[in-house]
Image: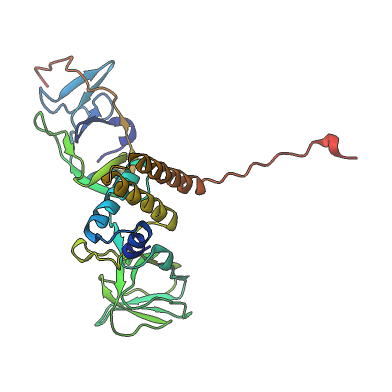
Amino acid sequence: MSSYVDKDYFYYLRGREILLYKMLGSRNQNRISQSGVLQSYDNELSYPDEDIVNGLRLEYTALNEPFVAEAIEDTSSVTSGIGISFTLGSPSFISDSNSGFTFATGDKIRIVGSSSNDQEGQVASSGTITTSRIDIGSGTIATEAAGQRITITQIPKEVASTSVDSTSSINLNKMLCLAVVDYVKAMIHEERGEIDKKEYYIKEFYSKLADNESNKRNISVAFPVSPFAVR
Amino acid sequence: MTILELMERVGTKNETLTIAYIKDAIHLLQSNTKEKIKSNKQDIINAHDGNDNIYRFPSDMIALENVSILDTSDSKYKRIKRLTSQPHYLIEDVSP
């Protein structure tokens, strides 16, 4: 059993690899091998000396789902409430006693708050799609009664790379799409040898990236009123 | 924004090249900001020889955000610290 991992484990980046080390002097005294024992300053480090299933988790950015079926501004359907239940069957479906569903056929959805059905799935491309019931096209659900507060959110549906065409949408918000427009313009001008214009549009590209980031970080500053202002 | 709309804005008819440029732009964007984060999990193995502590980055990784280890005693992933230099072999333990 692993514990105090935040204090015991360390990593080192080496090119495209990540090397894991574990502090030997803390809880685990099992030295693994002659070559596996290291010392750094006062603390000995060793290689990991235990199996942990899915023990290493990396968060990273990637070229992930670049194109989607519709603009992300249009993927706005969301339903939340305590009247949502799940029924496993043929077809499996989700019900809402408050008739709050606004999903369309083929929408990709994410379910959160459920004890046994937290997952991503897809509304069936045919079947019963109403405000009180949606048939599930993909994803396996378990039967679950209403009672918990569950939220179902529409999420962008990826277009497979082999199916991308001019009708596919870019999986970015409007501001970043405008930044991409600047980038493509920059590349076109570069191709023509118009470096000054390329530089201009690349600057615009980064400017919009910065705008998009700062738009999420609006800060309000409140100043206390001076007591000397009271008359 | 659809690819067609973007092509009209930039005045090009080359769809394949435009798609490639869009992917390049998203790549650059993901390298500079953190618009969309993915996670990857790998099993940690009990090391038995000299290269058992080496793990590979996901093949599609652009920028690393953080590294964490599963604490099985309370089922939480906890972030771990980075060593700025690789530890040197200062002690050769002949009787582990």
Foreground: B65 or A50? B65
- Judge whether A24 appears above or below A196 on screen: above
Colour option used: rainbow
Q: Residue at x 32, y 65 (%)?
A: B4
**In which image quadrant can residue A86 be found?**
bottom left
| Image x and y of residue A58, in percent | 27, 43
In the image, taking residue A220 as reference, residue A126 lies left or right, namely: left
Q: Does residue B74 appear in this view?
A: no
Q: Residue at x 28, y 79 (%)?
A: A125
- Judge whether A192 appears above or below A26 on screen: below
- Judge whether A65 appears above or below A153 on screen: above
Q: Quadrant of the C terminus of chain A?
A: top right
| Image x and y of residue B73, in percent | 31, 43
Q: Quadrant of the N terminus of chain A?
A: top left
In the image, taking residue A82 as reference, residue B60 lies left or right, namely: left
Q: Does residue B87 appear in this view?
A: yes
| Image x and y of residue A114, in percent | 38, 66
Q: Residue at x 31, y 62 (%)?
A: B3
| Image x and y of residue A141, in percent | 28, 71
Foreground: B58 or A183? A183
